Image (cartoon, helix red, strand yellow):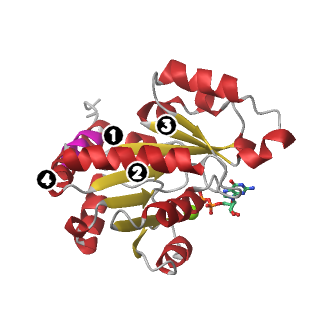
Amino acid sequence: MQDIKLIEVKQDILSENKELADNLRTRLQQEKTFLLNLMSSPGAGKTSLIQKTIEKLQQEFRIGIIEADIDSMVDSEKIASLGITAIQLRTGGFCHLDASMLNQALEDLEFQDFDLIIVENIGNLVCPAEFDIGAIKNAMILSVPEGDDKPLKYPAMFSVSDVVVLNKIDYLQLTEFDTLEFKDRINSLNAGAPVFELSCRTEDGLTDWTTWLKNQIDSFIQG
Ligand SMILES: Nc1nc2c(ncn2[C@@H]2O[C@H](COP(=O)(O)OP(=O)(O)O)[C@@H](O)[C@H]2O)c(=O)[nH]1
Ligand SMILES: [Mg+2]
């Protein structure tokens, strides 16, 4: 029988991606452009949080948005209607973004002209956690209707995120969601990661999030 050659495709792809992501991060640091990678499952509130964040921070920062979707332009049209520069990445079936896709989008956007670029990653709690896109910070949103057990089911996503947003707190009284349990579960995976509880609908808790983000950008630009 002939020898069978085993190729660890995933490992190769991931290490190549990591190198490209590190290069991208260095360029972002040189140009002082803060790249935020926003991840969540579909419908948790990525586009809503981006819209609210733009409203609160557009006076202070030059903001650009990169929208990723498997096959639509819906979200980038919403952002463009706010008068904000948006780029749409259509992944044609891919369930995540990677550093080379980001490289292309950042060149098109002329990223040097922005203080803050928010990337709306593909709605998915699995694949985006594996691919470093060169972001300065990774953020994820979980919405209350998804349940407080999600850190147990998707530990990688909760581990790679520098910050967690719990959205749709206006649903709390309709569910069994246990906020303390949820935070404990995050803490055991990712000690010290801040968790912001908010509602994009009522705007409760929104200012704590935008203040945190503003402080992160300010210290990044000054650093
Ligand atoms: N009740 C409630 N609905 C919300 C909230 N945030 C977003 N939504 C709704 O949830 C749906 C999905 O939100 P969207 O921002 O498109 O999620 P995305 O798929 O992660 O970008 C939309 O109908 C939003 O209006 C919230 O805080 N409370
Ligand atoms: Mg969206």
What whole-number distance in Å separates the C-alpha atoms at marks 4 and 2? 18 Å
**Residue 181 % position (x, y):** 68, 23
Q: Dot 1: what SS?
A: helix
60 shown above or below 20: below
Going 41% across and 58% down the picture, which residue do you hit?
A: 119
Going 71% across and 56% down the picture, which residue do you hit?
A: 202
Q: Dot 4: what SS?
A: helix
**Amino acid at dot 2:** Asn
Question: On the image, numbered disc 2 is attached to which residue?
Answer: 37
Question: On the image, numbered disc 1 is attached to which residue?
Answer: 10
**Amino acid at dot 3:** Met
66 shown above or below 178: below
Going 34% across and 63% down the picture, which residue do you hit?
A: 61
Residue 66 falls left or right of residue 125: left
Using the image as rendered, state which of residue 35 and residue 102 is in the foreground: 35
Q: Which residues are magenta?
A: 14-21
Question: On the image, numbered disc 4 is attached to which residue?
Answer: 30
What whole-number distance in Å separates the C-alpha atoms at marks 3 and 1? 18 Å
Residue 33 falls left or right of residue 142: left
Q: Are marks 2 and 3 in contact (CB under 8 Å)?
A: no
Quarter containing the C terminus:
top left
